[in-house]
Amino acid sequence: MRLLFYVVFLFSCSKETNSSLAQAKPNNNNSLLPTTSKGYVINHTYFSLSYSEANRQAEWVFYNLTPALINGSQTRTDDFRSDPFVKNNPVKSTDYTGSGYDRGHLCPAADMTLNLTAMSETFYMSNMSPQAPSFNRGIWSTLEDRVRTWALEKNGVYVATGPILSNICGTINNGTISVPCAYYKIIYKDNGQEKIAIALMLNNQGSSANLKTFVCTIDQIESLTGINFFSNLPDDIENKLESTIATANWSW
């Protein structure tokens, strides 16, 4: 009897865990992945990215940001390391040393507190981009906090984020790693009857401006990056979503 109970208990726990992970993983809707312009897609457990070998960083990172990912108990691991899935010349943890730039997360560590895997994968160097300290620790961090607030308010959102690699403001590591002049975030929510999105683009420098001042259209980001977002949505919905700005759909 005890053996039967134990087997049932294990099955129940496994079923619950798998259900929880399915709700947390970003890769359960690959139809929403952006197209690639400069890179190739790498799927990690809780986020995907398109890696540009020419720039030695991701051109986009995409994930489903759920309350489960945000409200976990996993602390920062700070285990910066090369991404084993980068095909050629992966960036090492020390390649930013002495550059004056932060190893700036694209998918923030604070978005991935669900478990050790989720947290640790954010410290792959493929998820890093050279960011000015005043930017990374200032307005960019403020935006990351706001995105988490939106995810909690709306019971999850999809996030696409990355550098504008068509506009480079220098290089580091003997000219091998590009320093982007600007970054973007696109937040998307399907409410069932309505699909809403907000896009922001920020220069790679400190700022005390209100986040609303950085709002732009998705079309503008697509024009600068060559990336097509939400290409699998019906054309009429995609065109409306990408050409309009609707700040009223989001708390500020």
Image: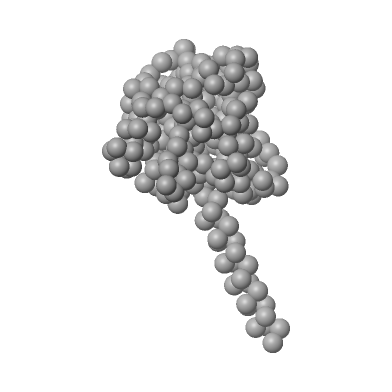
Q: Is residue 38 shown left or right of residue 203? A: left
Residue 12 vertical placement versus 122 (above, below): below
Residue 104 vertical placement versus 22 (above, below): above
Q: What colour scheme does the image use?
A: one colour
Pinpoint residue 141: horizontal percent, then vertical percent.
62, 26
Q: Is residue 54 shown left or right of residue 248? A: left
Q: Residue at the spot x=63%, y=25% of the render?
A: 142
Q: Is residue 31 shown left or right of residue 155? A: left
Q: Residue at the spot x=70%, y=42% of the render?
A: 75
Pinpoint residue 213: horizontal percent, then vertical percent.
53, 17
Quadrant in which the N terminus appears:
bottom right
- The outermost residue toward the top is 169
Residue situated in front as seen by the camera: 20 or 170: 20
Quadrant in which the C terminus appears:
top right
- The outermost residue toward the bottom is 1
Q: Residue at the spot x=37%, y=30% of the render?
A: 242
Q: Give the tally of numbered discs.
A: 0
Q: Is residue 144 shown left or right of residue 219? A: right
Pinpoint residue 91: horizontal percent, then vertical percent.
50, 30
Residue situated in front as seen by the camera: 130 or 202: 202
Residue situated in front as seen by the camera: 125 or 205: 205
Pinpoint residue 125: horizontal percent, then vertical percent.
53, 32
Question: Splitting the image into 4 quarters, where does residue 43 fall?
Answer: top left
Residue 43 visible within the image: no
Residue 212 visible within the image: yes
Q: Residue at the spot x=29%, y=37% of the render?
A: 236
Question: Splitting the image into 4 quarters, where does residue 37 fall?
Answer: top left
